[in-house]
Image (tube, rainbow, N blue to C red):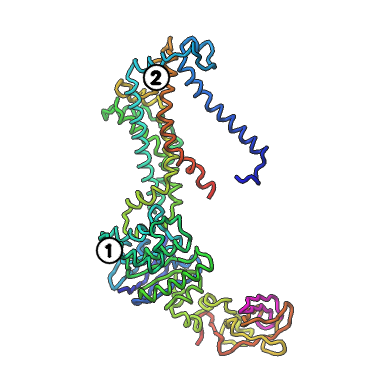
């Protein structure tokens, strides 16, 4: 924004508002991380103070790493999230390409049908999903989670990506056809690179709910071998006693993988969100 | 090695018919231009020839072979698009070579052909660049180069100059004309700009509402328009159309006279009128008159002339260059 068009006072207010929002958003995260380094008494006596020499303790992390297979839980969460994102992006982009590129009977209807998933939460179908998974013998497998999360992520992915696909120039695709590229080559080599920002946006929107989900792991894959991080942390929350050190440490650790994935996507993401708003 | 035959091509989108039976023959080495107003179906026709749109019915033959079921890449055509349509992630060299690479040509052959095409278009120093690092004119030259490299039977141009600024448009126009002379290839070119059509074409096809209005050389269309549409479309400023009844011609419905075929005098002449607007273009002066007999009349005079608004002048048409059109808007001969 040029200096001529925005006064220092106005930009000051804008920055104040943004800084305020940042503080509110970061506060719980910061509090979790700070308290995860304190002993139990310090957590309850002064929850807002940073760890001091006296209250500093790694007991939470020790518990987390000793009790249960946390590395395994992390691995499960990562596998489920990454594989689901991959399938959501692949199938979402393919469906979006078909909807935006080809004229066929029922195109609009199909688009609407696929978009309905945005409005109807997949959890409404939990009972049927569970019955299906039991019948298919997929209970307590990561495959069950990946299938459900792929289905959950597809509607939004198709909706966002098909809008972006429409903006890819027809001439470019036609030039590819004349140069002898197959429809698959046009999709993978011409269209996908051009909508990369949109793909990153979809990836982030898909990733966070999957990583944080407790519902489906609890129902479909509660076994020790297939526990995800969110489910694994529940071990420390009991009906009568909650091991706060361990819970906070587990949550602090769980933040980092998403953070890393986010950083990978974020450079693309900013372009994705602002695309269309400015030319 | 590059003739084209179209037989009763029809194309409908839903119930809306865009092409209503097009028959056309293009000989080897001809430069044919499709011209017409927006929405007349000229781009759709080009896409049907390229195979990017399927015709609802009809036949497309290239070199005598039916290609209606052949995919675009196998038709032996190359196309240049209005928006250049260069692959953004490939260098100029790879952009030009991709078609050959897909056909499985050996690398040495691709390199030789790309080198030849780029020297024709003086693109040698840009071969390693990406399209984003080129100016509009350079991009369009790369797009033309990409077409040359394929050595097609037919070159198809879809409004290739519309995105360029005026000066560059003239240069690129010259370049395309030069290219047609040196390659002796068959070229089909779509434009809505009648100046491009007049300057480049061997043969102009005037399209309107999905039908061919007239086919002919530029001068044929200018001198002998078949109907009022062609008469009005070719030539700038537009031909004057006068109600034949006002001129006492009962056999015709409309009389057409081009602005450049009327002379103006201050003292005497056929039609008396008042000047309502004057445009001084340097080489030409365009005078708009309101005359008692003909209504609004545009007159194009060569050189500079001092006429002012509200001057009373007399206009005299060159009667040998008048066009008479009948009730169906077709010319009477």
Secondary element at tag 1: helix
Secondary element at tag 2: helix
Which is closer to the viewer, label 2 or label 1? 1
Q: Is residue B191 magenta?
A: no
**Does residue B328 appear in this view?**
no
- Residue A205: image x %, image y %? 44, 36
Q: Quarter holding the N terminus of chain B?
A: bottom left
- The tag on residue A233 is 2
Q: Nearer the viewer, residue B221 or B184?
A: B184
Mark 1 = which residue? B109
Q: Is residue A168 above or below residue A243?
A: below
**Does residue A34 appear in this view?**
yes
| Residue sitting at the far front | B125
- How crowded pointer 2 is (Cα within 10 Å; few <14, some 14-19, many 20+) is rated as many
Residue at image position (39%, 50%) is: A191
Residue at image position (34%, 15%) is: A67
Q: Is residue A196 above or below residue A231?
A: below
The answer to whether marks 2 and 1 mark residues whose Cβ atoms lie closer than 8 Å is no
- How crowded pointer 1 is (Cα within 10 Å; few <14, some 14-19, many 20+) is rated as few
Q: Chain of mark 1?
A: B
**SS majority, magenta:** strand
Where does the magenta region start and end? B274-294
Q: Nearer the viewer, residue A74 or B17?
A: A74
- Residue A229: image x %, image y %? 38, 23
């Amino acid at each position: 924004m040029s200096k001529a068009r925005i006064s220092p006072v106005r930009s000051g207010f804008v920055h104040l508002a943004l800084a305020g929002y940042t503080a509110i958003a970061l506060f719980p995260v910061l509090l979790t991380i700070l308290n995860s380094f304190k002993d139990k008494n310090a957590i309850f006596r002064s929850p807002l103070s940073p760890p001091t020499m006296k209250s500093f303790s790694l007991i939470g992390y020790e518990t987390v790493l000793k009790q249960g297979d946390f590395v395994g839980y992390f691995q499960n969460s990562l596998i489920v999230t990454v594989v689901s994102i991959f399938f959501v992006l692949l199938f979402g982009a393919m469906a979006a390409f078909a909807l935006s590129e080809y004229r066929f009977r029922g195109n609009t209807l199909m688009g609407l049908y696929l978009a309905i998933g945005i409005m109807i939460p997949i959890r409404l179908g939990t009972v049927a999903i569970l019955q299906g998974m039991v019948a298919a013998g997929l209970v307590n497998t990561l495959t069950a989670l990946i299938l459900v999360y792929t289905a959950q992520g597809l509607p939004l992915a198709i909706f966002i990506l098909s809008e972006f696909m429409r903006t890819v120039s027809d001439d470019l695709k036609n030039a590819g056809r004349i140069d002898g590229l197959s429809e698959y080559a046009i999709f993978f080599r011409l269209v996908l690179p051009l909508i990369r920002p949109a793909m990153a946006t979809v990836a982030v929107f898909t990733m966070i709910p999957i990583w944080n989900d407790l519902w489906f792991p609890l129902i479909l894959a509660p076994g020790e071998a297939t526990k995800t991080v969110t489910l694994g942390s529940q071990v420390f929350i009991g009906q009568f006693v909650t091991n706060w050190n361990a819970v906070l440490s587990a949550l602090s650790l769980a933040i980092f993988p998403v953070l890393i994935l986010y950083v990978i996507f974020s450079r693309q993401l900013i372009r994705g969100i602002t695309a269309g708003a400015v030319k | 090695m590059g003739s084209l035959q179209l037989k009763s091509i029809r194309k409908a989108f839903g119930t809306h018919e865009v092409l209503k039976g097009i028959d056309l023959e293009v000989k080897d080495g001809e430069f044919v231009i499709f011209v017409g107003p927006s929405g007349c179906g000229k781009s759709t026709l080009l896409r049907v020839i390229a195979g990017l749109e399927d015709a609802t019915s009809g036949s497309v033959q290239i070199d005598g072979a039916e290609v209606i079921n052949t995919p675009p890449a196998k038709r032996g055509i190359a196309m240049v698009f209005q928006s250049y349509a260069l692959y953004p992630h490939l260098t100029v060299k790879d952009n030009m070579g991709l078609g050959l690479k897909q056909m499985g040509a050996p690398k040495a052959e691709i390199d030789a052909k790309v080198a030849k095409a780029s020297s024709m278009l003086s693109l040698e120093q840009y071969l390693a660049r990406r399209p984003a690092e080129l100016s509009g004119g350079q991009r369009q030259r790369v797009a033309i180069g990409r077409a040359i490299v394929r050595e097609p039977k037919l070159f198809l141009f879809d409004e290739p100059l519309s995105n360029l600024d005026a000066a560059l448009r003239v240069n690129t126009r010259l370049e395309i004309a030069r290219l047609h002379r040196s390659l002796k290839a068959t070229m089909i070119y779509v434009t809505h700009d009648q100046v491009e059509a007049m300057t480049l074409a061997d043969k102009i096809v005037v399209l309107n509402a999905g039908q061919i209005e007239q086919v002919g050389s530029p001068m044929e269309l200018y001198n002998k328009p078949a109907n009022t549409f062609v008469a009005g479309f070719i030539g700038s400023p537009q031909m004057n159309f006068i109600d034949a009844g006002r001129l006492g011609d009962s056999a015709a419905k409309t009389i057409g006279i081009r602005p450049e075929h009327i002379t103006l005098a201050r003292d005497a002449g056929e039609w008396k009128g008042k000047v309502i607007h004057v445009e001084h273009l340097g080489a030409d002066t365009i005078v708009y008159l309101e005359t008692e007999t003909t209504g609004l009349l545009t007159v194009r005079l060569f050189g500079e002339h001092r006429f002012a608004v509200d001057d009373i002048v007399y206009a005299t048409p060159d009667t040998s260059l008048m066009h008479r059109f009948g009730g169906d808007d077709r010319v009477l001969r």
